[in-house]
Image: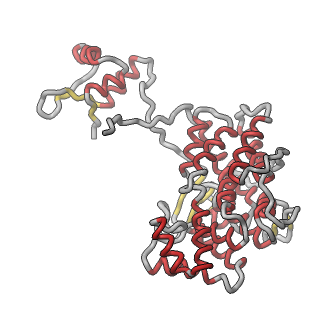
Amino acid sequence: MTRMLESAEAARRLGVKLPTLYAYVSRGLLPSHPAPGGRRSLFAAEDVEALAKRSRGGRSTETRLATVTTSTTQLTDDGPVYRGHPAIGLATTVRYEDTAELIWRGDPVPEGPWAPVRLRPPRALGASDRLRWAVVMAGAGDPLRSDLRPSSVVAVARRLVATMVAVLPGAPGASALPPPLELGVDRFLDTVAGALTARLAPAPDRALVRAVNAALILLADHELATSTVAVRVAASARADLYDAVLAGLGVVAGPLHGGASQLAYGLVRDAEALGPERALDDTLRWQHRLPGFGHTVYQGVDPRFTVLEGLVADLWPADRRPVLDSLVALAAERAIPGPNVDLGLGALTRTAGMPEDAGRTIFTIARVAGWTAHYLEELEERPIRYRARAVYATRR
């Protein structure tokens, strides 16, 4: 169906005044069409765009909303698929680092070190502020931060992830050294998951590291989530990776994105203290929704929750284990949408004795992998391609 424009809109897109627009019509440069009733003229949008390109040497006067083509992640009913590899399969078989390399380079074998920049954050900063501070300071200390070659971008991403983990405050009573991670191949590995678990949990062990590693992989990317769009917009303007990651961090700071697991943590905590029925009822009364339930992509249970649920079941003491099952069962009885990954992350951090905001921390660090992959893709597109079309309206 042809999209028609009013005279004023056609003139705006051409960058001319109305008399000039009518002169184009009289000279046969732009066809006009009578509006219903015959008292106004309308113009086909494609005719206006064609004239705009001719009058400006082939350049369009208005940047259209971008269509994003990606080969990083495909969303399916079985969860995200990273370059052809289902995330739910990767979660319990490889390291987070391997998954990051896979979505960056198509090869899961790391080609460079995951070494942090040595920084001393101010003690007063909380976890979220420390992550942002680390990105700012790491970028400020990089003399070649504007090197946008893919190999350089990936090297920065490895360094950023390691630095963000390293600046986190240690959990009270936590081990000074990260525990090893065993991945079913009879070998022990020092990993991002191990270092992160040692920072967040008062009593890290191998099973908990495996669960955190799985969470990092499951959360590494989720196609065009809001924070990822922010990163791609920054990349479109050719911001360096440090600044692009800061754009993503700004969006993650919202309670409806990266902070959703913290609300789910509170729900699990209340279910333990008050019982599932009271916890669900109180949450609905004050929040009018259930954190950790429902997802715009998955109609039923989020497959990522299923993976985390199984790992959490192995961590929870037997007397606490039924709490999560009761929450999910009670919600299902009332036809509440199925549980999502935020509930799994909230349950994981709660059972491990981590701080309430630990889920946000895990989510944020995990997502740097996906942001970097989308950043690299965006560098291959024409710059400044994102431009939303505003509709002006006078507010009363």
Q: Give x and y (percent) for residue 134.
A: 75, 45
Tell me the quarter of the image containing the C terminus.
top left
Can you say whether 349 is above or below 246 in the image?
below
Q: Look at the image and tell me whether residue 180 can be seen.
A: no
In the displayed structure, does residue 26 sit left or right of residue 361? left
Quadrant of the rendered image containing residue 384: top right
The residue at the point 55 percent across, 67 percent down is 292
Q: Look at the image and tell me whether residue 307 can be seen.
A: yes
From the viewer's side, name the closer residue of 153 and 53. Answer: 153
Quadrant of the rendered image containing residue 138: top right
In the displayed structure, does residue 26 sit left or right of residue 145? left
In the displayed structure, does residue 272 sit left or right of residue 394? right
Q: Give x and y (percent) for residue 363.
A: 65, 57
The residue at the point 60 percent across, 43 percent down is 231
From the viewer's side, name the closer residue of 96 and 137. Answer: 137
The residue at the point 51 percent across, 43 percent down is 68
From the viewer's side, name the closer residue of 176 and 214. Answer: 176
Q: Residue furthest bottom?
A: 319
Q: Give x and y (percent) for residue 280.
A: 51, 75
The residue at the point 27 percent across, 34 percent down is 4
Q: Give x and y (percent) for residue 263.
A: 58, 64
From the viewer's side, name the closer residue of 386 and 90. Answer: 386
Tell me the quarter of the image containing the N terminus.
top left
Q: Residue furthest right?
A: 176
Q: Residue furthest left?
A: 37
